[in-house]
Amino acid sequence: MPVSPNALTRIVQESGVMERAFQIRTQLVTEAIPIQVKAVTSTSVSYTILPTDWLVIADTAAVTLTLPPAADQTQVFVIKNTSVGNITLDGDGSETIDGAATKVIATTNSLTVASDGSNWVII
């Protein structure tokens, strides 16, 4: 005899299977993805981005922000230009950003970059 969808839902709810599945999923996500709080840095001078940074806000035009070595990074950096002019984002040494030595970020724009292990890519 077929079981109605309502009866099946009631059986699953009463058994606690869904609640236990949710608990297991929550535990797996919590253990697999450690949350790291990163710094928000605001600068009005040229600045070398630190591994502890996450969001870097440039509030003065004509500054250069230099990324850390790509080989050492497993995180994403967000760069925001709040100045009235352009800022420059530069890779470490000869490293590139999407194939270019530098990227200009216009006023009010932002750029998000991640390391591919040897250079930087815009995401």
Image (tube, rainbow, N blue to C red):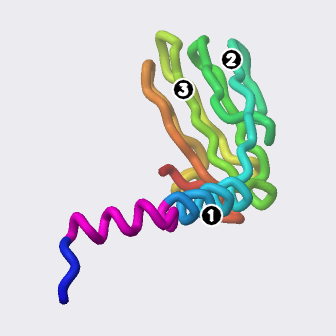
Q: Nearer the viewer, residue 19 or 80?
A: 19
Mark in front: 1 vs 2: 1
Q: Secondary structure at mark 3?
A: strand
Q: Residues within 10 Å of mark 3 (few under 14, many from 20)?
A: many
Above or below: residue 53 compared with residue 63: below
Query: x%, y% of residue 30?
Result: 69, 53
Residue at the image position 71 percent from the left and 42 percent from the top: 67
Tell me the crowding category of disc 2: few under 14, some 14 to 19, or many 20 or more residues within 10 angstroms, Cα based.
some
Residue 12 lies in magenta, yes or no?
yes
Q: Position of residue 1 (x, y in %)?
A: 19, 89
Which comes sooner in the sequence, label 2 or label 3? 2
Q: Can residue 41 be seen in this snapshot?
A: yes
Look at the picture and state if 33 lies above or below 12.
above
Which amino acid type corresponds to the residue marked 1 in the rendered image? Answer: Ile
Q: Residues within 10 Å of mark 1 (few under 14, many from 20)?
A: few
Residue marked by disc 1? 24
Q: Which residue is mark 2?
A: 42
Real-space Cα distance between discs 1 and 2?
A: 40 Å
Q: Are marks 2 and 3 in contact (CB under 8 Å)?
A: no
Q: Tell me which amino acid carries mark 3.
A: Lys
Instruction: Mark 1 or mark 2: name the one nearer the start of the chain.
Output: 1
Magenta stretch in the rendered image:
5-18
Q: Position of residue 99 (x, y in %)?
A: 53, 58
Secondary structure of the residue carrying numbered label 1: helix
Kind of residue sitting beneath label 2: Ser
Q: Is residue 21 magenta?
A: no
Residue picked out by circle 3? 80
Q: Residue furthest front?
A: 1
Residue at (48%, 15%) from the top-left corner? 85
The numbered disc on residue 10 is none
